[in-house]
Amino acid sequence: MSRVIAGKLLAGVIFGDGNTKEYIYLPAGEVGSSAPICIMESRDKQRDLVLEEAVAQVLRLSLKPARHPLLGNRSF
């Protein structure tokens, strides 16, 4: 797991791709949680991912820090 990406997710950075409409972020309610759950959005679907899975998806999909259409640059 990339500690850099995990740290950025925990700091509220949103990773995504505006062309494919895929975004991964940590919702505000998960800040400080012992087992944080991230959200992965793709088109009209959302699913929960544990932090390790979220980091793996960011790497697999080559997502970069992005601006979410509703949340902006940060998730909290």
Image (spheres, rainbow, N blue to C red):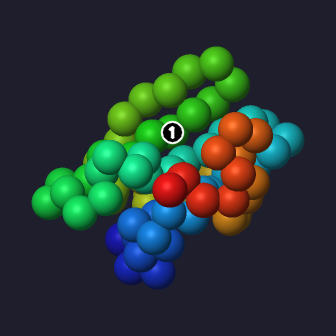
Residue 15 horizontal/vertical position (percent) = 62, 57
Residue shown at 63% from the left, 30% from the top: 42
Q: Disc 1 residue type?
A: Met
Residue at 41% x, 75% y is 7
Q: Is residue 28 above or below residue 31?
A: above
Q: Residue furthest top?
A: 44
Query: Horizontally, is 42 left or right of 57 in the view?
Result: right
Do we see residue 2 in this rendering?
Answer: no
Q: Is residue 53 left or right of residue 57?
A: left
The residue most toward the bottom is 4
- When asked about the image quadrant of residue 20, the answer is top right
Nearer to me, 11 or 50: 11
Residue 76, x across and y down, in percent: 50, 56
Q: Is residue 15 above or below residue 43?
A: below
Residue 68 seen from this side? yes
Question: Quadrant location of residue 21?
Answer: top right
Figure label count? 1
Q: Considering the numbered disc 1 on the image, is that residue within a helix, a strand or a loop?
A: strand
Compared with residue 21, is residue 59 higher up or lower down, i.e. above or below? Answer: below
Q: Is 71 or 18 nearer to us in this picture? A: 71
Residue 43 in percent (x, y) is at 69, 25
Q: Quadrant of the N terminus?
A: bottom left
Residue at x 32% of width, y 46% of height: 29
Q: Is residue 67 left or right of residue 15?
A: right
Label 1 Cα crowd, 10 Å radius (few <14 / some 14-19 / many 20+): many
Residue drawn at (81%, 45%) of the image: 18
Residue that numbered label 1 is attached to = 40
The answer to whether residue 44 is above or below residue 62 is above
Horizontal side of 64 relative to 7 (left or right) equals right
Query: Which of the 4 image quarters holds residue 23?
Result: top right
